Amino acid sequence: MGKAHLHQIHPVLPVQNVVEALSFYVNKLDFKIAFANDSKNPTYAGVRRDDIEIHLQWHDAKEWENTIDRPMLRIVTQNIELLFEEYTSKDVFHENTAIRETSWQTKEFAFYDLYKNGLTFYQELQ
């Protein structure tokens, strides 16, 4: 019998409006819609870009009183400078967003989606 192999992860991010979140990920971050549980008013959907799939799940506004403890995804990428340039033209960054080299030997940049879910894109320094 073989050993189990983990090969993907599909994180689920909480959002207040799945349609708005889909629009952000598709129009600003160049993801494609992978699926939605309803074509007109989805409460659960997935977006995909290259080998990354992120799921978006509706949560009631009452759950949003706590503004801290939001999910933070770290997404490994290649050609980080090209991705940074692409997203710069899409107006998704905070004014202080920049590519930086870290003491843990990565080059990375980070920002938040519409619902304050953190997205960090990084690559290992060579």
Image: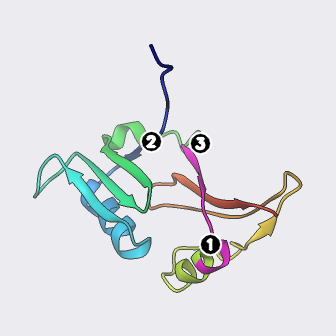
Q: Residues within 10 Å of mark 1 (few under 14, many from 20)?
A: few
Q: Residues within 10 Å of mark 3 (few under 14, many from 20)?
A: few
Spot occupied by residue 82 in the image (x, y as percentages of width and height): 61, 80
- The residue stretch that appears in magenta: 71-82
The residues tagged by marks 2 and 3 sit, at their Cα atoms, a distance apart of 18 Å
Discs 1, 3 touching: Cβ within 8 Å: no
Residue at 44 percent across and 56 percent down: it is 51
Check residue 11 in the rendering and tell me which mark sits there, or answer none. Answer: 2
Q: Amino acid at mark 1?
A: His
Spot occupied by residue 61 in the image (x, y as percentages of width and height): 34, 44
Furthest-front residue in this view: 1
Residue at 51 percent across and 81 percent down: it is 91
First reached walking from the N terminus: tag 1 or tag 3: 3
In this orientation, which residue lies closer to the viewer: 101 or 50?
50
Spot occupied by residue 113 in the image (x, y as percentages of width and height): 48, 61
Residue at 52 percent across and 86 percent down: it is 89
Q: Amino acid at mark 2?
A: Pro
Front disc: 1 or 3: 1
Discs 2, 3 touching: Cβ within 8 Å: no
What is the secondary structure assignment of the residue under circle 1? loop
The residues tagged by marks 2 and 1 sit, at their Cα atoms, a distance apart of 23 Å
Q: Quadrant of the N terminus?
A: top left
Q: Residues within 10 Å of mark 2 (few under 14, many from 20)?
A: some
Total count of labels = 3
Q: Amino acid at mark 3?
A: Ile
What is the secondary structure assignment of the residue under circle 2? loop
Residue bearing the label numbered 3: 68
In this orientation, which residue lies closer to the viewer: 28 or 7?
7
Residue bearing the label numbered 1: 94
Q: Horizontal placement of 81 versus 58: left or right?
A: right
